[in-house]
Image: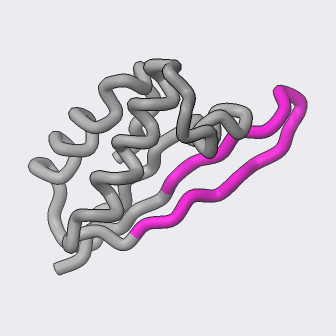
């Protein structure tokens, strides 16, 4: 499942992804580093808050094993998350 939509709703997309998944499903979340802004705990940006909540939900869900990977390219730096649904 590839999630690349409005970031404030990433937590909802994750919930739906889990409803539609089975063990072995891979869930990718795109643009989750937000040029480093996700590390700023004081950010009021709705996109950053959506990604942070997305990460919190993945971390708290025992069905998921997940990581985030930073990427660097011509547009600067960002990244993606990758989670696998466990049994």
| Image position of 9 with respect to 21: above or below | above
Dominant SS of magenta comes to strand
Where, by quadrant of the figure, is residue 79 drawn? Answer: top right
Q: Position of residue 57 (x, y in %)?
A: 28, 52
| Image position of 46 with respect to 10: above or below | above
Q: Position of residue 84 (x, y in %)?
A: 35, 68
Number of labels in the image equals 0
Q: Position of residue 70 (x, y in %)?
A: 71, 52
Quarter of the picture holding the C terminus? bottom left
| Image position of 29 with respect to 45: above or below | below
Residue lying furthest right = 74
Residue drawn where x is 83% and y is 44% of the image:
72
| Image position of 50 with respect to 24: above or below | above
In magenta, the rendered stretch is: 66-81
Pick the residue in front: 87 or 35: 35
Residue drawn where x is 43% and y is 26% of the image:
7
Q: Is residue 34 magenta?
A: no
Pick the residue in front: 69 or 52: 52
Q: Is residue 76 magenta?
A: yes
Q: Is residue 9 left or right of residue 37?
A: left
Q: How is the image coloured?
A: one colour
Residue drawn where x is 55% and y is 32% of the image:
42
Residue lying furthest bottom = 87
Residue drawn where x is 35% and y is 53% of the image:
56
Q: Is residue 15 left or right of residue 7?
A: left
Q: Is residue 34 left or right of residue 22?
A: right
Where, by quadrant of the figure, is residue 22 drawn? Answer: bottom left
Q: Position of residue 46 (x, y in %)?
A: 44, 19
């Amino acid at each position: 499942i590839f999630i690349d939509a409005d970031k404030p709703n990433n937590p909802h997309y994750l919930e739906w992804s889990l409803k539609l998944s089975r063990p072995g499903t891979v869930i990718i979340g795109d643009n989750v580093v937000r040029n480093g802004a996700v590390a700023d705990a004081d950010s009021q940006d709705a996109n950053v808050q959506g990604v942070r909540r997305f990460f919190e939900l993945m971390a708290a869900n025992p069905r998921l094993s997940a990581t985030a990977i930073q990427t660097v390219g011509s547009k600067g730096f960002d990244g993606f998350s990758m989670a696998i649904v466990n049994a």
